[in-house]
Every structure is written in C-alpha cells, then in structure tokens.
Image (cartoon, rainbow, N blue to C red):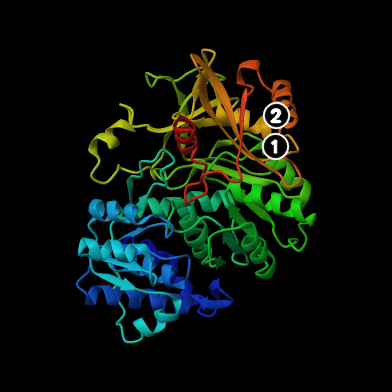
C-alpha cells in the first residue's frame, strides 16, 4: 500500500499522540487529533458516496480544516484539488468545468460556493469553528490501499501568463518529494515551520504539510493573506525555527522594517530561511543577511515537478544564482531545437525526475508541448549553466529584444534593486515608435519620490552594472506591482497595461 497520508500520520499518532502537529490562531492540534479528524472527514465523504477516485475541491485558508480535508481525502482514496482561496469567481467556474468534482468544500461566504451553486455542484461550508461539530459522529474511513501510480491531487498553476492549467500528481510523487527534500532540508522533530506560500500551491503543500508532518515537527498555519506584519508576528510569537517564503515577502519584510527603522529582533530561534517561487534577487539576499545574519536557502522548481530540482544551501550559496541540481533530478539548458548548449550559453531550462507530472488534465496538446522527444520537461524558463551552477534568467514569455539583442528582465531587475531607492521592480519590453526599449516598473522605498533626477540616477546606476542595451530608458513608478495569488509578479499584466495606456 502506498497511501501517503497514512504514511505521514498513523505511526506518528501512535508513537507521539500528544505531540503538536499544527498551531493556528493560538490553538494547537495534536497528531492524535489530526488523525482522528482526517479519518472522520474521509468517513464523511464516504457517507456522501464519494470514495476512491471521486474528486473534491478544497477552497479553504491554511487551517486545521484544510489539513483534515486534504489528508481525509487522501486516506479515503479521494482525489483532492486544493485551490488558492483568493482566486476570482470565474477561476473557480473554469476549474469546476475542467475537473467536475463531486463536492466543493469552502469557507462561509466564499466565491467558490457561488460558483458551485451556478454549476449545480454540491457544496460543504466549513471553517475551524465548525470542524469538530461536523465530524463528531462521522465514522473513521477505512484507509484506501492506494497504489504508487494512483492520481491523488490536482494542483492549479498560478497563471503568470494568464493561462492556469490543472496539473496531475500521483501518490508516488508525494513519497519521492518527502524523501528527496527531507535529505536536502534536514528538518527535525523539534522544528517549528512557517511557510507563507499557501497549501493551494505545491510549494505551500510542501512547506506546511509534507515537510513538517513527515518528521513529526510542528507547522504554524496563517489563515490570512501573507503580509510582512503577519509573517513577522508569527515568526516571533510562535518561535519559528524554519521560515519558508517567496522573494516578494522577504522584500516587503525588509521594506517594512526600513520604514519603521526597526531591527529584525526576536528571531534568534530561526535557523533556516528558504525562498522559492521566483528567483531571489541578490540585493534581497544581501539585505536579509545583513539584517539577520542568516543566508536564505534557495530552490527552483515548478508545479509540474511538485518540488525543487535545483537549489542552494550554506556554505555553497552564490547570491543571485539558483544553485546546483538536487539529486536525483537532472537539469539541462537547451536551444530552440531542444539540443544541449555549451556551458555559459543561455537557453531553456529542461528537467528530469520521477516527480514530474504526466501532464495537464484535459489538455493533451499542452501536455505534448512541454516534453521533448526524450522525455525532458520544458520549464518555459530561460537559464544559463556555468560550472554546474544554474542561473534563472526569467520566463521565456518575459524575455524580449532591445536593439536586436536579448534582454533578461531578471538581470535588469537585480541591477535596479541594488539601488537604495528601489524596493521592487519588474522589467518589460516597450516601444517608442519603431524602436524597442527597456521599461522598468518601479516601487520606491519610503522616503524617496519619483522625478527626473531619480530617473537619471536609476539609469546611471543601471549603466554601471549592465550592457548599455539592457539599461532601461523608460521608468514607470507604481504603488505596488500586480501579483499572482502565490506572490509572483505578473509581467504580462504590466505589458498589457502599458500597451492599453
């Protein structure tokens, strides 16, 4: 039997029933309680006629309810689709049409409930306050004897290009992720983890469920949207030892502290910081190290791989570089014909590994398009490899030419972020009549104002660090940048806004 939820929970609940599995809003849930609730949730679904192979939407904030629903589905052999709880109603409508679940589980008043009602899909309204009463009389489900190749979870991509897709993952993928990443991270039983990425995404699932529960550690769950204030409060009050987040949260934490001239005090217990989701700018890495004395570990992966295939950890971290291949994965840089390029030559990143998805649900053409003839996954990211170190240059959709030469948005952004006035930035292509140009979209740090003098200073700074064709000639100042629900910058939105303007 290869039921990953049973692997995570049952033995730990027997050995350490009173150990705290999760904390949320000041309350604790032990491993014994988590097993009881998860088995009862599986029994509730079985009583509704949803058994092995059935499909359920989970649209809940990170909470005890989310844990019980996801694990209860897996224990009972039900295929779960954990969705980000901050999507638009239309996103849920489209996902309902693609996946056709037997049930939608969502918090009171959520947009997903309206989408379910319009589709005629049964729904269950749930939050942590109603979890215990709902499951009080539900029988424990008989653990489904899953096989390695059984589909168990659908993840919906965050849609940095505006086209979300449903990614299929299987039981064996979860086992492999736990094994490989357990070796890389070395999380311990006495660790307390906080992951700002939400469990509706593969990264959040890894940081808030797979990694802590696999070793018997404790996870801190945040029901709210991740903000610098929430993250800092939880890091301090919950005595977090492992913090997993995304570049934008690290950036905003540094911005928030700079605005208040506050030190990052009270974090002495944090021993490991990790970043994924997008490339971590060198300026953010250096700023965080200067503030905390901690180097941010880094990982590169995707929803399609379900985990990280390239990473770096001390003492081998090079700022601005993703890192080296994590065994047993493989990573390669390919040209437009899917042939390997020499070291130092940019190309598309392609990866190999046994957690790679078999494809997208109901999307055979998209599925065929992401694999090479010999089975490598084409990530859609540009990168370069040198001496075994991989640098991510950006999404292929975001790359553009200026003056006939290729521009890497991430390289330009890293240069601008090293200026003391710049808090965040995103770089896109633009045009001025028949000429192409590099456009920088900038969010300033508190105390700095946009104006001709600052524009000139930013351009001069860029010219010191970049080839002249990469230095922006157009600057647009914003109060904030458009983000996906998982915290990635949506450059395609900035391009569209600029063209419409």
Between the C-alphas of marks 2 and 1, the distance is 7 Å
The x and y percentages for residue 392 are 54, 32
Q: Residue at x 57, y 38 (%)?
A: 279
Direction from residue 419 to residue 364 in the image, left or right: left
| Residue wearing tag 1 | 450
Kindly indicate the quadrant of the structure image that contains residue 139: bottom left
Nearer the observer, 459 or 294: 459
The x and y percentages for residue 274 are 61, 50
Direction from residue 262 to residue 305 in the image, left or right: left
The x and y percentages for residue 118 are 23, 62
Q: Residues within 10 Å of mark 2 (few under 14, many from 20)?
A: some
Which numbered tag is attached to residue 306? Answer: none
Q: Residue at x 47, y 75 (%)?
A: 13
| Residue wearing tag 2 | 455
Q: Reading the chain from its start, which is encountered first: label 2 or label 1?
A: 1
* Cβ atoms under marks 2 and 1 closer than 8 Å: yes
Asked whether residue 140 is in view, the answer is yes
Direction from residue 447 to residue 55 in the image, left or right: left
Relative height, residue 381 to residue 171 (above, below): above
Q: Residues within 10 Å of mark 1 (few under 14, many from 20)?
A: some
For the N terminus, the image quarter is bottom left
Relative height, residue 254 to residue 134 (above, below): above
Nearer the observer, 41 or 424: 424
Q: Residue at x 49, y 23 (%)?
A: 400
Label 1 secondary element = loop
Relative height, residue 42 to residue 102 (above, below): below
Q: Residue at x 25, y 54 (%)?
A: 99
């Amino acid at each position: 039997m290869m039921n990953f939820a049973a692997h995570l929970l049952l033995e730990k609940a027997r050995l350490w029933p009173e150990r705290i599995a999760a904390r949320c809003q000041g309350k604790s849930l032990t491993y014994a309680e988590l097993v009881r609730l998860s088995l009862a949730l599986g029994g509730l679904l079985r009583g509704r006629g949803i058994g092995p192979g059935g499909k359920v939407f989970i649209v809940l904030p990170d909470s005890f309810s989310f844990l019980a629903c996801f694990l209860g589905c897996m224990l009972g052999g039900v295929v779960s689709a954990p969705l980000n709880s901050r999507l638009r109603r239309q996103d849920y409508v489209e996902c309902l049409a693609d996946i056709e679940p037997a049930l939608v589980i969502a918090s009171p008043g959520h947009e997903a409930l309206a989408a379910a009602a319009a589709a005629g899909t049964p729904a269950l309204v749930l939050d942590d306050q109603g979890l215990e009463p709902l499951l009080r009389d539900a029988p424990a489900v008989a653990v489904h004897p899953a096989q390695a190749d059984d589909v168990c979870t659908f993840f919906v991509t965050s849609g940095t290009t505006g086209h979300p897709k449903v990614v299929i993952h299987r039981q064996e993928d979860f086992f492999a992720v736990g094994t490989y990443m357990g070796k890389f991270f070395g999380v311990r039983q006495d660790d307390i983890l906080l992951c700002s990425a939400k469990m509706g995404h593969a990264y959040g699932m890894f940081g808030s469920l797979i990694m802590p529960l696999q070793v018997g550690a404790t996870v801190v769950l945040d029901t709210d949207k991740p903000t610098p204030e929430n993250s800092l409060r939880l890091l301090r009050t919950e005595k977090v030892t492992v913090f997993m987040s995304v570049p934008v949260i690290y950036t905003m934490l540094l911005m928030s502290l700079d605005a208040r001239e506050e030190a990052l005090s009270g974090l002495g217990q944090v021993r490991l910081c990790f970043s994924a989701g997008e490339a971590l700018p060198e300026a953010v890495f250096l700023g965080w190290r200067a503030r905390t004395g901690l180097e941010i570990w880094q990982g590169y992966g995707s929803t399609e791989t379900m985990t990280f295939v390239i990473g770096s950890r001390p003492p081998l971290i090079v700022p601005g570089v993703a890192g080296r291949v994590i065994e047993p994965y493989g990573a390669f840089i390919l040209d437009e014909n899917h042939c390997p390029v020499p070291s130092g030559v940019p190309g598309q990143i392609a990866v190999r590994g046994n957690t790679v998805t078999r494809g997208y649900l109901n999307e055979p053409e998209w599925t065929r398009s992401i694999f090479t003839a010999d089975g490598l996954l084409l990530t859609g990211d540009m990168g370069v490899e040198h001496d075994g170190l991989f640098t991510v240059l950006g999404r292929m959709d975001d790359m553009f030419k200026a003056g006939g030469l290729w521009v890497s948005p991430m390289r330009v952004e890293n240069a601008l972020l090293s200026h003391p006035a710049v808090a965040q930035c995103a770089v896109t292509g633009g045009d001025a009549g028949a000429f192409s140009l590099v456009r920088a979209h900038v969010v300033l740090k508190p105390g700095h104002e946009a104006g001709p003098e600052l524009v000139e200073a930013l351009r001069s700074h860029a010219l010191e660090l970049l080839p002249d064709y990469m230095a922006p000639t157009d600057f647009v100042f914003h109060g904030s940048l458009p983000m996906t629900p998982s915290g990635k910058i949506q450059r395609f939105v900035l391009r569209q806004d600029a063209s419409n303007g």
